[in-house]
Image: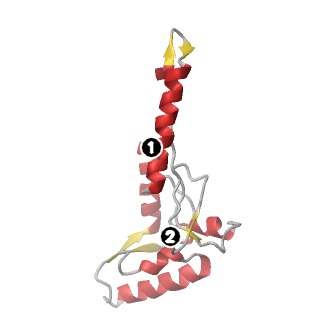
Amino acid sequence: MKRVEDGEQWTLFSPDEAPDLHDVFETEFEERYHKYEQQAGKNELRQSERVDAEELWRKMLTRLSETGHPWLTFKDPCNIQSPQGHVGTVHSSNLCTEVTPNTSANEHAVCNLESVNFATHTVDAELDWEYLAETIETAIRMLDNVVDL
């Protein structure tokens, strides 16, 4: 966001050439990011691209406005404010970004969601409790399978 505010450019890197950026934030991120920018400037990286930071930001906001995706959250505040920073780095969030779980070398955090459409469980404006119970049982089994896998 500093580069957006300052009208500067942002450099995009291939994750396989800058893999550690995913695990760091704040000052450490900035230091490593600048190192990769220098390497890119010397053509030491296979893939990198400099883009106008504000233009990229506007494209991201346009996509969010048009499609509802991607949801955006900010890595620094999530990690700085995380009460579980000792567990690992927050790499991602759930779909709506209100949950930001930590990820470590041994665990990859995910947020699994399930929805039930109550309208499909009504008969004559009354909730079909038996059908709802079956649906919820299936949904829980499906979520358990996802977590196990």
> Residue at the spot x=47%, y=42% of the render?
141
Could you tell me residue 41's position as x and y percent? 36, 87
Q: Secondary structure at mark 2?
A: loop
Amino acid marked by disc 2:
Gly
Q: How is the image coloured?
A: secondary structure
Residue 70 in view of the camera = no
Could you tell me residue 10's position as x and y percent? 44, 73
Viewer-proximal residue among 10 and 137: 137
Query: Can you identify the residue that label 1 sits on?
Result: 142
- Quick one: which residue is furthest to the left in this view? 46
Query: Can you identify the residue that label 2 sits on?
Result: 7
Q: Earlier in the sequence, mark 1 or mark 2?
A: 2
Q: CA distance from mark 1 to mark 2?
A: 47 Å
> Residue at the spot x=54%, y=11% of the render?
125
> Residue at the spot x=46%, y=88% of the render?
35
Amino acid marked by disc 1:
Met
**Badge 2 local density, few (<14 within 10 Å), some, or many (20+)?**
few
**Badge 1 local density, few (<14 within 10 Å), some, or many (20+)?**
few
